Image (cartoon, rainbow, N blue to C red):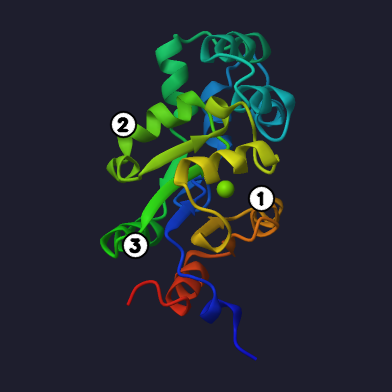
Amino acid sequence: MIPTNMTDPSPRSIVFDLGKVLLDFDYRIAAHALSTERGPAPEEIMRHFGSAPLLSRYETGLMTTAQFFEETRKITGYAGSKEEFAAAFGDIFTPIHSMIDLHEQLRQHGFQTWIFSNTNELAVQHIRTKYPFFANFDGYVLSYEQKSMKPDSGIYDVVEKMTGCRSAEILYIDDRLENIEAGAARGWRVILQETPEKTLAQVQAMGLLR
Ligand SMILES: [Mg+2]
């Protein structure tokens, strides 16, 4: 039997999730920064940042950054300025260097690369300022701009439209199974990122770095 990757065309567009693929993140850092003596404990704040409605509404573009700031201030009793809040909320990332290197190599091999992320304006502003690699993509499909979150099909349509690619022309890397499954259902090639090492090995096995 011929493996499918020998009959499919090579991917032209490589679509990267951001969080836990290129940048690690930890909302506990923000929760600690926003926690005050009289306000709720970091654990309480975390409930609003986890899978809770507040962050989800913000990342779906249903509330502006100003509204998100106001809501968070009400919940936490945070007394700092909007700028201090932005710094505390944005500074939760750690670069995954081997994946940032892999992205650079794929660009050198001529692939178009794209960011496909459930995220928010404050995070993206922070990442743009702090991580130069983030400028080196052909385009960005961001949930808060598209008003749609992975794994909803609408935002996958946007990826196909923006890249001009379909099915096996797209290679998609994400750490969340439900997101990957939605891509695979469209015939995209997919890599579920478990560790950066495993992702790298799979990209090499596809022959993309020859
Ligand atoms: Mg992720």
Q: Is residue 149 above or below residue 206?
A: above
Whether the residue under disc 1 has CB within 8 Å of ligand 1: yes
Can you say whether 103 is above or below 121 in the image? below
Q: Position of residue 68 (x, y in %)?
A: 59, 15
Badges 3 and 2: C-beta atoms under 8 Å apart?
A: no
Real-space CA distance between mark 1 and mark 2, rounded to the nearest whole angstrom = 27 Å
**Where residue 28 sits in the image (x, y, percent)?**
58, 36
- Residue at image point 65% right, 8% down: 74
Is 194 placed above or below 48 here? below
Query: What separation in Å lies between label 3 and label 2 (alpha carbons)?
Result: 23 Å
Residue 138 or residue 176, whichever sits in front:
138
Identity of the amino acid at label 3? Leu
Q: Residue 128: percent from the left, percent from the top?
A: 34, 33
Question: In which quarter of the view is residue 2 placed?
Answer: bottom right
Numbered disc 1: secondary structure: helix
Please tell me which residue lies in front, 123 or 117. 117
Number of dots carrying numbers: 3
The residue indicated by pointer 2 is 129
Q: Is residue 109 left or right of residue 98?
A: left
Mark 3 or 2 closer to N-term? Answer: 3
The CA span between labels 3 and 1 is 22 Å
- The dot on residue 106 is 3
Which dot, 1 or 2, sits closer to the camera?
Answer: 1
Residue 127, quarter of the rendered image: top left
For image coordinates 47% across by 47% down, the residue present is 164
- Quarter that holds the C terminus: bottom left
